Image: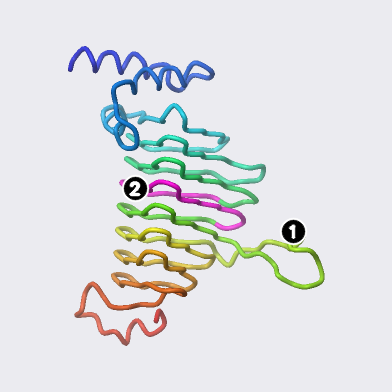
Amino acid sequence: MELRDRWERWCLRFARLPLIGVWGRWLASRGYKPYTGAVPLARHFPEGFDAPSAKLHCDEFHRGLNCFIGDGALLMNEPGGGPIRFGNRVLILGESTLLTSAGGSIEIGDDTHVQPRCQFSAVKGKIRIGKKAEIAPGCAFYPYNHGTSADRPIQDQPLESRGGITIGDDAWLGYGVAVLDGVRIGRGAIVAAGAVVVSDIPDMAIAGGVPARVLKLRNPSNPLTELKAGT
């Protein structure tokens, strides 16, 4: 193990360098299985680990310690896009896309896990995800709205944001959840697979459906009447 550790450290010395960095990551990850197999590399080294096939095209990307970016993930600031910020030990798994444009930004808190094929399109608005949140595969986040007036083609319609998207600490979003602009999902809330969230979900609530509505509370001692606005 000591020899393996020394080999990985030597390879990762070059991981952030242009051109040859991808080779350093490729060599360090040899022997690890796909998907989450190389996560220990991120846990062992403070600078974290980006899979060789991950694509980072960011002028503003700030990450904490021990972060992992998986196979085929794309992080990108388009012209005018704001920063992407990670806390410590953030996991972004395969083929997820994190994009900022037109002043949008993305912030993900400590120990949050994003499963494969999620889409974060931070255009106009901000996407803020708290600590220890669990985001299942195929979730989508759109903190902006597209105009629909009949006086011009769809491609020419203006974009606007009603305040972006906020996901609280310890929230859990099931497979394929879509979260739209102006929504806050509270601390400890659970959103069932396939839901479309168009209005706020309170703390510690379980929600589902299209559009999503509150089904019950994780803490029954809280009166449901307090959640009337979220139902």
Residue at 40% x, 36% y is: 70
Q: Nearer the viewer, mark 2 or mark 1?
A: 1
| Location of residue 134 in the rendering, given as x and y in whole percent from the top left corner | 33, 54
Q: Secondary structure at mark 1?
A: helix
Residue 144 lies, with reference to residue 35, above or below; the image says below
Circle 2: residue type = His
Image-quadrant location for residue 130: bottom left
Q: What is the x, y in percent for residue 66?
A: 32, 34
Q: How is the image coloured?
A: rainbow
Neighbor class of circle 2 (other Cα within 10 Å; few <14, some 14-19, many 20+) is many
Query: Of callouts 2 and 1, which one flags the residue occurring earlier in the amino acid sequence?
Result: 2
Asked if residue 27 is positioned above or below residue 102 in the image, the reply reads: above
In the rendered image, the vertical position of residue 19 relative to residue 140, given as above or below: above
- Residue at 40% in and 66% down: 185
Report which residue position mark 2 lands on.
113
- Mark 1 = which residue? 155
> Is 27 one of the magenta-colored residues?
no
- Which residue is found at the position 48% from the left and 57% from the top? 140
In the image, residue 153 sits, relative to residue 210, either above or below, namely: above
Amino acid at circle 1:
Gln
**Crowd class of label 1 (few under 14; some 14 to 19; many from 20; radius 10 Å):** few
Q: Position of residue 73 (x, y in %)?
A: 47, 39
* Magenta region, residue range: 105-125
Quarter placement of the N terminus: top left
The C terminus is located in which quarter?
bottom left
Position of residue 42 measured from the top left corner of the image (x, y, whole percent): 32, 31
View extreme (right): residue = 151
For residue 99, side relative to residue 45 (left or right): right
Dots 2, 1 in contact, CB < 8 A: no
Kindly identify the residue that appears in the image at 58 percent across and 52 percent down: 104
Magenta span includes 114: yes
